[in-house]
Image: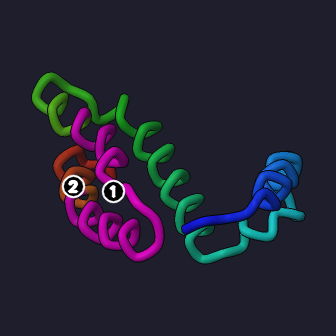
Amino acid sequence: MAFGPWMLTAFKWLAKARRYRGSRWDVFGRSDERRLERSLLADYEADLAALPVALTRTTLGDAITLAKLPEKIRGFGHVKRRSIDAAAPEREALRVRLKIV
């Protein structure tokens, strides 16, 4: 794609609007994808908070795998959704093995 010089002005405005991210003025924050990303982050933080209780020598490998699971979630739109759907069963299986239910 080719864009004209006006695009640099648009990027400057977007950079200035960065301060509104996460606030009620964040127009993109209400999209389904952003809501899903925030719920994934909350789930990940909850998993990490529960790990110290479940951590033993035998569960160390599973704990590391669970902590690294978000690295498998990549892309945007339908690509990200596909990787989330692929990681979900693995997350649940790891949570069961670690007894984080």
Q: Nearer the viewer, residue 74 or 89?
A: 74
Q: Give amino acid for label 1.
A: Val
Q: Are marks 1 and 2 in contact (CB under 8 Å)?
A: yes
Q: Nearer the viewer, residue 7 or 62?
A: 7
Write the start and end of the magenta stretch as one range.
64-90
Q: Which of 26 and 64 is in front in this view?
A: 26
Q: Give amino acid for label 2.
A: Val
Q: Please report whichever mark, 1 or 2, sits nearer to the chain's N-terminal start.
A: 2
Q: How far apart are marks 1 and 2 (CA)?
A: 6 Å
Quadrant where the N terminus sits is bottom right
- Neighbour tally class for label 2: few under 14, some 14-19, many 20 plus, Cα within 10 Å: few
Kindly identify the residue that appears in the image at 88 percent across and 47 percent down: 16
Which mark identifies residue 101?
A: 1
Residue 73 percent location from the top left of the image? 35, 55
Q: In this view, does 77 lie to the left or right of 26?
A: left
Which mark identifies residue 7?
A: none
Is 82 within the magenta? yes
Q: Name the residue under label 2.
A: 96
Q: Main secondary structure of the magenta part?
A: helix
Vertical position of residue 47 compared to residue 33: above or below: above
Residue 10 percent location from the top left of the image? 82, 59
Kindly identify the residue that appears in the image at 78 percent across and 52 percent down: 8
Is 29 within the magenta? no
Vertical position of residue 36 compared to residue 95: above or below: below
